[in-house]
Amino acid sequence: MEQAYSEPVTVYFARMLQMDFGLVPVFTVLPDGVQRERAALEVVLKGPPAGSGLRSLFPPQTRVLGLTVADGLATVDFSAEIMTGPWGSAAEALALGSIVNTLTRLPGIDRVWILVEGQAPGSLGGHVDISEPLRYNPDMLALPLTDVTGHWAAGHIHAMYLADIVSGYPAGDYRPEQNVTREEFIKLIVLTAGLEPADPEQPTFPDVGKDRWSSGVVEAAVAAGILNPSDYGANLRPAERIGRREMAMLLVRATGAEALATSLTGAELPFTDLETEPGWGRGYIAAAVKLGLMNGFPDATFQPGAFTRRGEVATVLGRYLKVGEEEIRLVYPAEGSQVRAGDGVLVLGVARVFESTLQVRVRAASGGDVIAQTYTMTTAAGWGIYGALLPAPGTPGEFVVEAYEQSAKDGSEINLVERRLLTVP
């Protein structure tokens, strides 16, 4: 068992997307016998694990030279390396926000004064004035999208938004009922499958030339066998709205289940509107249903020709990534991920739980002994982001991370989700 404080410390990591940016609060535990303020700040400087979708903003050589707390003011002295960061306006604001918000969440601190080599620098990159102490800034938080509260797909929309698969619009909305074009869906499935854009010498489709924004993702889908050019004739018609039958076809191919679809061309399906569905379409629909990627509608129809909406897309992509269907969705880490022994395990997801509080723990795969545990809170009362950073086992081998809610009725564990990971030397 690793020793840790009973109360977690909240640190703030940056999330930067094309359309927006903000800070994500992450609850973490610290070993006994350390100065909490300094230890929390060093977690921020180290940054989140690579691949988590969160950003490390500070130059790796940056050190804390000194940290004192008196009368509610934390004075932090950094080494000169902090001045060499890539300080655009957004990055500088996020870096400062991660420092100040982290320290001001600790007892006895309401202001933070930042020094560099013992002197007040005035600014890190010329965008934010730090000549005076700074206070906690709630406006820096990465907040959920504004127009999906109460929508049936809200959980998956927020999960895919956190995973940086789908994005909102400049006004902060998502527009879940808006239709999706063919090239938009192709881009999303390519991102979800982890494919890189491709650039062949000759474009596959005359109407998706190298100058079109979707060219790289279309070519990646062709190279991966997700798009079969013979299905579309001479042109892809990328700006056309995509239907549910076609979405099923592309999803099944992305999972590598083409043979399954072929075997199900004569399958009986529990939908009332597929009597005239061609065999190939029936096969892909049956495969998508069997794989748990798509369902029908409450009136027992599938509506294969209906146009796909943005809420539906987020849902099928969430199922593709297996983030879960319960009140707790786990976005990161992925099943089977590797973590270096002794490093931290970052757990990120979205949840809709009682009083916005849930539990996260790391336990041994064999025997189930708990290695570390903390509670965490979501960023919103409805679907909100949660994050926890816990120590991984110190020895190589398989282990499990779990997130769950404790029942308000009897204290039992409910809505549990888990990932099996591997510690490596």
Image (tube, rainbow, N blue to C red):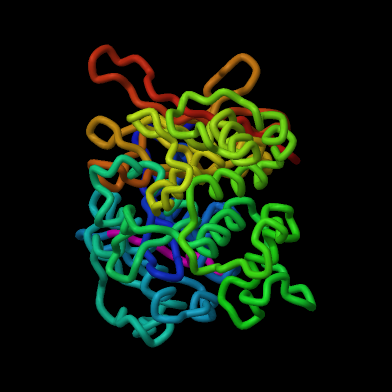
Q: Residue at 20% across / 60% down in the picture? A: 71
Q: Main secondary structure of the magenta part?
A: strand
Closest to the observer, 419 or 210: 210
Percent x, y of residue 310: 40, 54
Residue 384 seen in this snapshot:
yes
Magenta span contains residue 82: no
Percent x, y of residue 153: 35, 43
Residue 388 seen in this snapshot:
no
Q: Residue at 49% across / 56% down in the picture? A: 242
Image position of 280 (left or right of 56) = right
The image quadrant of residue 343 is top right
Q: Is residue 395 above or below residue 164?
A: above
Q: Is residue 57 above or below residue 281?
A: below
Closest to the observer, 421 or 396: 421
Q: Is residue 11 above or below residue 366?
A: below
Q: Residue at 71% across / 61% down in the picture? A: 229
Quadrant where the C terminus lies? top right
Give the magenta range: 62-69
Percent x, y of residue 373: 45, 30
Q: Residue furthest top?
A: 410
Closest to the observer, 193 or 10: 193
Image position of 281 (left or right of 122) = right
